[in-house]
Amino acid sequence: MDSIKKLTYILYFIGNFMMLTYSGIFWDDWTLYNMNDEGIMNQFYGNGVVVFGYMHIFLQNLINTPLIYHFCTIILQLLSIFILFKIIDKFKYKNSIFLYFGILVYSVLPLFDAKITMIVLPYTLCLTLFITATYFLIIYKFERIFLFRILSLILFFISFFTTSLIFFYLIPLLLIIFYEDLRFIIEHKIKKIKVVFNILIKSIISHIDFIIMPVIFWIVRALYFSPSLQYKEMNYNEIKLESFFEIPYRLIRSIYAFFITLYPLLKELFQNLEFILLFVILSGFIFFKLSRFNLNLKSTKTKFLIGLIVCFIGLFPYILVDKYPTFTGYSSRHQLLIGFGISLLVVNLIFYISSKTIRNLTLAMSIGLFVILNIIIQFNYFKGFMKQVVVNNYLESQNFSRDFPQTILYKDNTSNFTHKGNPSSFYELSGILKLSHPKENIMLIQRNEFISNNQDSTFKKLTPYFFSYNLSNYHLVNPNLELEISYSKKSLPIYPLVTYYGDYLSGNKERWTEYFDFNLKVL
């Protein structure tokens, strides 16, 4: 068992260590980084989670802020993995090695890559609190220590600020609170409905605080933490009646979008010799480690069904508000909970294989693939960071400073340079521009975004809150310039991982500018 735990931690670190080596700022991070306290609090007051606003203000005042966030994310995820193992140990399940491998697969699945952003740290924190609360609930159930009951309630309540966890709460609620009663009913083959009903009612009454807690949370949130400001204007996470009728369609759409958006990452793996070599080495290492285990485990239809149910429970709260767990952009934040179910499905499918050698090889290659996909995703974020450095270097060299607002269109002919971290939204670009031109009166924006935000009145809704988007002294004006970024005549390297990362580690980031050309023209 300890060997599986060690292997889990090693593989997790291999897949994620790159985020600890550089200070990347991505997506909504630009509404936190280099932002005043008022701008940060406006955002979190608006989306109804003020407590996270104070957390971000504290972290933003530390040295090398992005790396602090990345370090916190790694620690929280490792803590979650550790506690998941403790939960399995506490239950003393006879086939616990099966669940151990489930945790191993869960820890290396290439999901939720948006965790690299500073803005998504609360998601990671809330999930860790949720898992810890589940563990405390189990301790209470087994040892009847009242303190752990109180701690569990408190941590569950705080974790619900990531609202998808409220629905996911069904799992600990049903599997832990009613675990003993359901097992008693099954083992004693109790068939009288009245007896079963009395047993369950007694359990409900004795755990009424856990059962009504989500309701209390919703009441408290509706009274004190409901969306306001720009989030209210834009119907942030609004649930409509028709959403329930569209669940089947949205479920199919989610599955389709998940695999379609995974394809570019798989394609990059098989087009890059560096990643192929790493995949072979890792798979061989994992296969060698697995050969030491006696994996005479069998899958069952029940386990497979449980995996499907857990998947659906993790997916449901997102598709209800029309959000999908894709690999596009930062939508992977909607993958926060589906890893639990997917890991159970993967392990079940692999352990259906009867041949020990083929089963071990399939498991090793699957885990190796997941780890390599994590590395590819992390490297894509690194390339996004690289692109930001190049853009910032160019902007620093230009004199854009004016005493009046400007709108500069941004045309990116290099959007295929990376799948992740590419600066594209107006507040990302304006945040980068703010580093060298701090007047906050210039909007740098792509033409399509400028047109669409005008047509659907998004800018009209956001104008009072421009100070939260690095545009304190800006008001909407027609574009007068266009900045175009293209590839230079210099060929991109054959071995990008070694080349780009080598330049970074050797302190030669200026070489990155050689791959790009800029053209500024008057409209």
Image: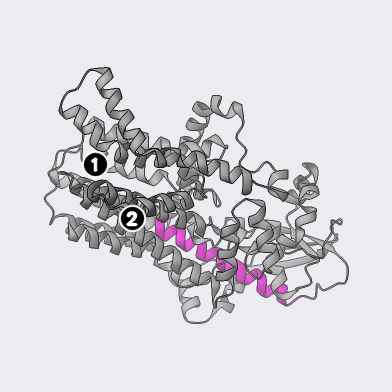
Q: Please say which color scheme the image uses.
A: one colour
Please say if 399 is above or below 496: below
Of tags 2 and 1, which is closer to the observer? 2
- 413 relative position to 71: left or right: right
Q: Which residue of the protein is positioned furthest toward the right in this rendering?
A: 404
Q: Residue at x 35, y 33 (%)?
A: 204
Q: Is residue 495 visible?
A: no
- 195 relative position to 315: left or right: left
Q: Is residue 305 visible?
A: yes
Residue 140: x and y in percent read 28, 49
**Residue that label 2 marks:** 147
Helix, strand or loop for the magenta stretch, by majority: helix
Whether residue 94 is in magenta: the answer is no
Whether residue 377 is in magenta: the answer is yes
Q: Residue at x 61, y 73 (%)?
A: 513
Residue 16: x and y in percent read 40, 63
- Which of disc 1 and disc 2 is earlier in sequence? 2
Q: Which residue of the protein is positioned furthest toward the bottom in this rendering?
A: 507
Tag 2 secondary structure: helix
Please say if 511 is above or below 383: below
- Quick one: quadrant of the N terminus? bottom left
Residue 484: x and y in percent read 72, 62
- 377 relative position to 143: left or right: right
- 174 relative position to 485: left or right: left
Residue 350 is tagged as 1
Residue 311, quarter of picture: top left
- Quick one: quadrant of the C terminus? bottom right
Q: Which residues are magenta?
A: 374-398
Q: For the residue carrying disc 1, how many other residues have a C-alpha within 10 Å: few (<14), some (14-19), or many (20+)?
A: some
Residue 107, quarter of picture: bottom left
Looking at the image, which is closer to me, 151 or 362?
A: 151
